[in-house]
């Protein structure tokens, strides 16, 4: 068993990673990362607006929103 802590996507310290990929794979990966970041920003803005109008959203409901958002877009992490 490893002594390294488990982190979810977007959590934990930054680390340098070197990987060789075909150009097509690298382009697709970059495009998907950008799309995911933009979608995340969109949902964050929507949730912030909702909370400004309605008050704090419980963490379980915030996670449910993310799960539904990912499901609607056909993505999962």
Image (cartoon, helix red, strand yellow):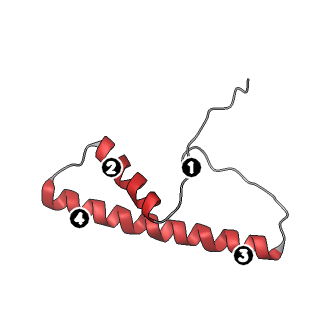
What distance separates the C-alpha of mark 2 from that of mark 4? 13 Å
Query: Pointer 3: residues within 10 angstroms few (<14), some, or many (20+)?
Result: few
Q: Give percent across and percent down for residue 30.
A: 66, 71
Q: Secondary structure at mark 1?
A: loop
Q: Give percent across and percent down for residue 77.
A: 56, 52
Earlier in the chain: of badge 1 and badge 2, it is: 1
Q: Nearer the viewer, residue 31 or 7?
A: 31
Contact between labelled residues 4 and 2, with CB atoms less than 8 Å apart: no
Image-based side of 26 in relation to 70, left or right? right
Earlier in the chain: of badge 1 and badge 3, it is: 1
Earlier in the chain: of badge 2 and badge 3, it is: 3
Image-based side of 27 in relation to 74, left or right? right
Q: Give percent across and percent down for residue 37.
A: 51, 66
What distance separates the C-alpha of mark 1 from that of mark 2? 16 Å
Residue bearing mark 1: 9
Query: In the figure, 11 relative to 1: above or below?
Result: below
Query: Pointer 2: residues within 10 angstroms few (<14), some, or many (20+)?
Result: some
Contact between labelled residues 3 and 2, with CB atoms less than 8 Å apart: no
Residue drawn where x is 32% and y is 41% of the image: 60
What distance separates the C-alpha of mark 1 from that of mark 4? 24 Å
Query: Pointer 1: residues within 10 angstroms few (<14), some, or many (20+)?
Result: few
Count numbered badges in the picture. Answer: 4
Q: Secondary structure at mark 2?
A: helix
Residue bearing mark 2: 62
Residue drawn where x is 57% and y is 71% of the image: 34
Earlier in the chain: of badge 1 and badge 4, it is: 1
What distance separates the C-alpha of mark 2 from that of mark 3? 31 Å
Residue drawn where x is 81% and y is 76% of the image: 23
Q: Give percent across and percent down for residue 54.
A: 14, 56
Residue bearing mark 4: 49
Residue bearing mark 3: 27
What distance separates the C-alpha of mark 3 from that of mark 4? 33 Å
């Amino acid at each position: 068993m490893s002594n390294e802590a488990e982190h979810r996507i977007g959590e934990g310290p930054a680390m340098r990673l070197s990987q060789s990929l075909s150009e097509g794979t690298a382009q697709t990966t970059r495009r998907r990362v950008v799309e995911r970041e933009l979608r995340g920003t969109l949902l964050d803005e929507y949730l912030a607006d909702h909370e400004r109008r309605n008050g704090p959203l419980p963490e379980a409901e915030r996670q449910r929103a993310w799960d539904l958002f990912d499901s609607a877009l056909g993505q999962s992490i």
